[in-house]
Structure formats: structure tokens, C-alpha cells
Amino acid sequence: MEQLGKEACEYLSRNTDRLTEEIIQCQLRVQPNLKERYGIQGYEFYQRDIKYHLQFLCSALTYLSKGLFGSYVEWVRRLLIDLNIPPEDITTNFQCFKRVFETKAPGPLRDLLVEFIEAGLALLETNPTAIPSYLAADFPLSDLATRYLEALQGSNADHANQLIEEAIKSGVDIRDIYLQVLENVQLEVGRLWHTNQLSVAEEHYITRITQQIMDSLQQYIQPSKRVNRKMVASCVPGELHELGLRMVSDFFKLSGWEVYLTGANTPSNDIIKTLKKQHADLLAISVTIPWHVIEAEKLITRIRQDPELCDIKIIVGGRVFTLDPQLWTRIGADEYAPNPQAALETVEKLF
Ligand code: B12
């Protein structure tokens, strides 16, 4: 069955342009005024979005994860509704995916493709739910997190810096600053972008300042003891979300590990060379975007086949593994953890 999922994904990748065209033609038959309503640019976005849907569907099929596809459908619906796309257009679009798969996909793959699209269509029949603010919940540093985000939304990086410095000086643990303030603010920034309340430029600005602040906090990352262990921490090729992995790295440093962080978008060949050169005990891989999971799987397979790396342990984490908590078991990793503290506890059991 897993093989069928991979074949279905290959079929979608090989035929993306043709399928996109068929889906658009289907939708134009049902809604002939689509081009007029969206204008030329909107229509191009429409084509781009169909390719996006196919790419996300492909990743979900590879791991036979309806959960992953379902979370994408919920996510994209929210995104499009907040961009004023009528829900009927989204549903018609997915119905056209179904129709095109029913009529064009080769026999053995057809049922699987239709099954996934039907699961998506069933979700579109439910009412969309609002995503609550990540800062609304009652957690000890929620006030600091809110003020920090307000400072950055007001483009006052100095004030944001000052808030964090004061908190550290008053004795707040750096780990709480990371998880309660910086992580929650990043998630909130994602929510605001997703719901069309914040621009990409504003997200980039806030993320950049947060990374600068994490650099300046390095002076406080001083372990009280050393353990004789070394971790290499990398994001797979193409993966640009590295902030979470930086947090994991700093938690490990604080616990006495030596850490070699390569961060975002690291070529697999180089990760393998680094593991050897650094004589690492552990590789931490971070993945956020679903279609990068396949890169993680390929990398892990290569490491497992390399006699020089037979003792290496591998832990994975990042947003995509949180969306489908079984996913990590399908790519050959030793462990998964949802956050840096859990990662430390989990890794303890591996050695
Ligand atoms: C900042 C950001 C970016 C930045 C990243 C910059 C950087 N240097 O990291 C940039 C601008 C590059 C970016 C690009 C994109 N992004 Co972006 N991004 C975000 C945002 C707003 C914040 C990410 C972040 O910093 N999170 C905070 C960290 C701390 O959380 P975390 O990564 O989950 O890490 C925690 C745990 O997962 C765990 N963990 C993480 N790694 C590991 C590893 C191990 C081993 C372990 C044990 C644990 C672990 O520990 C961490 C601490 O608890 C998120 C919003 C969100 N909800 O995540 C969107 C988000 C992830 N991005 C999104 C999208 C769509 C994109 C793009 C595709 C947009 C585009 N069209 O170009 C591109 C893809 C780029 C790529 N090729 O990777 C979507 C993903 C939607 C989906 N359905 O998958 C999100 C969710 C935004 C949204 N709300 O819609 N993005």
C-alpha cells in the first residue's frame, strides 16, 4: 500500500502541468466566469494554487497520511477565505480534482487519489473554525510575549530587545523566553500572516529581529556541566525554517552537549560529511514543510547504509511531525520529539 502512495505522488509530480490544465478546464466548465471574476493575475494565482494543492497532496500520499492532507485542506481553506475567495470556489476546485482523477488517473492509483480528495471534500463541508491567538492562552509570560510582539509590530526593535534583556536580568530562564515568548510570538506571526492581517515583509522583519535576539542571548547559553556527547543539527535541503532547530540546539548546549548547528537548507552530502568529521553521536533533523519529509527519509536511508555511521542516532522534529504524530515512524528515524525539553528526555533513553 505504501508503494502505491509513492507511485501516486510520482504520477502527480510527472503530470503536474497537464493535471493543472485539466482541473482548470473542468472548473471553467462549471464556473465559466472564473477568469472574469479573478482577472488575469488572480487567474495565474489560481493555477499556482492548484500546483500547491498537488504538491501537498503528493507529500501526504507518499506517507499515506490523510491527517497531513486534512491539515493542509483546513489550512488552505482558512488562507483563501481570508483572501475573500468564496468557499464555493474552493469546493468546486476540489470537486474538479476528483473528477479529473476519476477520468484520467491510471487504474491502480485512481481509487487512492479519489479517496484522499474525498477526505478533503468532507472537511470542506464542515464550518471553518477561527484559529485562536497563540498569545490569548493563560501562560506565565503571556504579558511579556504580547508586549514583545507589539514592539515589533510597531517596528521598535530596540524596545523588543530591551524587554527580553530586562526579563533575563530579572531572572527569567532563557528556556522560558524561548518557548513562551519567542516561539509563541512566531506562531502568532504565522497566524496573523495566514489570516491576512500581517504582510510577508512584516513576518520577515519580526523573524529577523527574533533571530538577532537569539544571537545576543548566546552569552547566556552556558552549561553548568559537560556531557561527552556531540549533536549535529540540520534542516534538510530546501527547508528554510530553522528557528525551532536553533532552539533545540541551545537547549542541548545548556544541558552540556557539544552542538554543531548547520541550520537551514543543508545539502544531504554535507550533512553526511559533517557527521563523520564531527564524530557526532546524534543527528537532529528539522522539517516544517510536508514535501521536505521525503528529503529527510532519503537522508536517513543513506546514513543507515553507511558503515561509518552505524552508531549514529537520529531524532526528528518540526511542525510537520506534529501535524501527524505517526509520520516519524515511517522515515526510519530513531525518535521524534515535539519540543526541545521532550527531545532531551527522549534522547537520554537512546544512549
Ligand atoms: C518564520 C516563518 C518562515 C520563514 C523562516 C525563517 C527562518 N529562518 O526560520 C520563511 C520566510 C523562510 C518562511 C518560508 C515559508 N513558509 Co513559513 N513560516 C514561518 C512562521 C511564521 C514561523 C516559524 C517559526 O519560527 N516557528 C517557531 C518555531 C520555534 O517553531 P517550530 O519550528 O515548530 O519548532 C518547535 C518544535 O517544532 C520543535 N522542533 C523544531 N525542529 C525540531 C527538530 C528536532 C530534532 C526536534 C526534536 C524538535 C524540533 O522545537 C521547536 C521549539 O518548541 C511559521 C508559522 C508557524 N505556525 O510555524 C510559518 C509557516 C511554517 N510557513 C508556512 C509557509 C506556507 C511557508 C512557505 C511555503 C511560504 C511561501 N509560499 O514561500 C515558505 C517555505 C520555505 C521553505 N522552503 O522552507 C506555513 C506552512 C503551512 C503548511 N500548510 O505547511 C506556516 C505554518 C505559516 C502559516 N501559518 O500559514 N517561513
Image: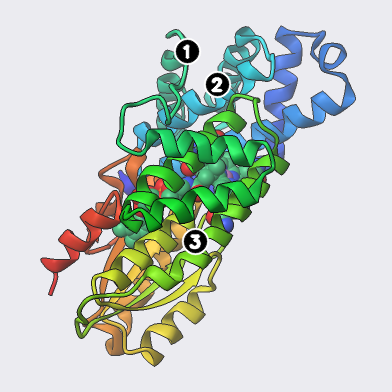
Check disc 3 and report the residue beneath it.
Answer: 214
Quarter of the C terminus within the rendering: bottom left
Residue 306, quarter of the rendered image: bottom left
- Identified at 27% across, 62% down, the residue is 332
Q: Which residue is mark 1?
A: 128
- Nearest to viewer (mark 1 / mark 3): 3
Report the amino acid beneath label 1. Pro
Q: Secondary structure at mark 2?
A: helix
User: In the image, what residue occupies the spot 76% across and 30% down?
Assistant: 45
Residue linked to disc 2: 78
**Is residue 15 among the parts visible in the rendering?**
no
Classify 10 Å Cα crowding around label 2: few (below 14), some (14-19), many (20 and above). many
Q: Work out whether mark 2 precedes mark 1 in sequence or the reverse, and give the earlier one.
A: 2
Give the Cα distance between marks 1 and 3.
Answer: 36 Å
Whether residue 338 is visible: yes
**CB-based contact (under 8 Å), mark 2 and mark 3:** no
In the rendered image, the vertical position of residue 347 relative to residue 330, given as above or below: below
Q: Amino acid at mark 3?
A: Met
Position of residue 32 measured from the top left corner of the image (x, y, whole percent): 80, 8
Asked if the residue at tag 1 contacts the one at tag 2, i.e. Cβ–Cβ closer than 8 Å, the answer is: yes
Q: Quadrant of residue 129?
A: top left
- Left/right of residue 104 with respect to residue 313 in the rendered view: right
Q: Image point 20% across, 79% down: which residue?
A: 225
Residue 257 at what x, y percent from top left? 27, 77
